[in-house]
Image (cartoon, rainbow, N blue to C red):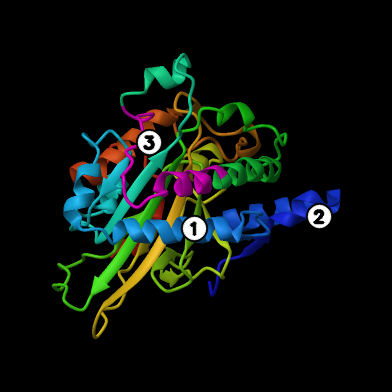
Amino acid sequence: MTSLPILDLARWTRDPADRRALAADLDAAAREVGFFQLVGHGVPADLVARARAITDEYFALALDEKLPHRPPSAEINRGYAPRNSESLAYSLGDDAAPRPPDLFEAFNVGEEGWPADDPVYASRAHDIFAANIWPTRPSGFHQAVMAYFAAVKDLAWRFSGVVATALGLEESFFVDKVDHSTNLLRIISYATAASDADPLERQIGMGAHSDYGLFTILYADPVPGLQVVGRDGVWHDAIPEPGAFVVNIGDLMAQWTNDRWRSTLHRVLPPARPAQGVNRRRSMAFFFDGNWDMTVEALPTCVSADNPAKYAPVMAGDHLMAKLLGPRLLQASKATSTVGDRAVALD
């Protein structure tokens, strides 16, 4: 694997032959790699630039100013996460040995605007649909971040039709399965300063993990850092083309497709130590995870007499919460693993 496949979403608006070709290319990329780049996505570059710039301002604040934005409990996936507060390798459960805490800081944002009388929202307003935690500085942070959130959510909805078609389903298959999706935007900063102490043994920017839900839409600096496991069991650099989103398949989609599509292990190395100053890498990951209360089980287009279902049915919310808590409590996650025989790459 020398680079991630590139898919052009603009082909989805043209003639039927283009649509079929795009769906086939998606199926091939999801089977072989589980990661690919998406261009022609329609998300305005100035909106992306604004979100990146204002989150840079936030992460530049003093730690004492950011710490009050931490969530009150590990179950609430909102607000600020400082360096050394999570270890993503724990999300793999017993497939990975414990790792030191990761060297990233992040800010998490979820959906807003649910009606107060919505029964799904009301039932989980204490944890998975908790209110966002907003800083007062920098000015305009809330508006810029939620504008980006809305644009990428719209992209995820549009792309879900391609996903359904690629799996041999009706284009509208996912509509009633993501109308209460536990969508999350995680804005992440990796920084290495000349004055930093040496990392602990086996400590990196973000530990090896697979994403938890349906698929992830990532905007990242086009610099080294992200690495994915290829079919050869080796870590490969994955540097996005400027302006492209990196999309990867998550655990729930792997279970839904009976491993036809790969939820690929990936990790992030910290920036190289500079002679002076700070080296940074930024990313914005939008997790499209499906409805909290939906049951995920192998799709009829992905099973046969010779290829029976590999995973027991699971409620999406239970899976997501188990995955979230492992890294935050520094305990092996109890969620179903899709790592399979790929654990050899973890070291």
Q: Which residue lies under the disc numbered 3?
A: 320
Mark toward the start of the polypeptide (2 vs 3): 2
State the residue at coordinates (37%, 61%).
Answer: 56
Magenta-colored span: 127-150
Mark toward the start of the polypeptide (2 vs 1): 2
Judging from the image, what secondary structure is the residue with disc 1 in? helix
Q: Residue type at mark 1: give it.
A: Arg
Q: Residue type at mark 2: give it.
A: Asp
Give yes or no for residue 218 being in the magenta stretch. Answer: no
Q: Residue type at mark 3: give it.
A: Leu
Q: Which mark is residue 18?
A: 2
**Mark 2 near mark 3, Cβ–Cβ under 8 Å?**
no
Judging from the image, what secondary structure is the residue with disc 3 in? helix
Give yes or no for residue 141 being in the magenta stretch. Answer: yes
Q: Residues within 10 Å of mark 2 (few under 14, many from 20)?
A: some
Residue 294, given in percent of the width and then of the height, sits at 49, 25
Answer above or below: position of 226 versus 217: below
Q: How many marks?
A: 3
State the residue at coordinates (38%, 50%).
Answer: 139
Residue nearer the viewer, 149 or 4: 149
> How much space separates mark 2 and mark 1, taking CA atoms?
33 Å
Judging from the image, what secondary structure is the residue with disc 2 in? helix
Q: In front of the other: label 3 or label 1? A: 1
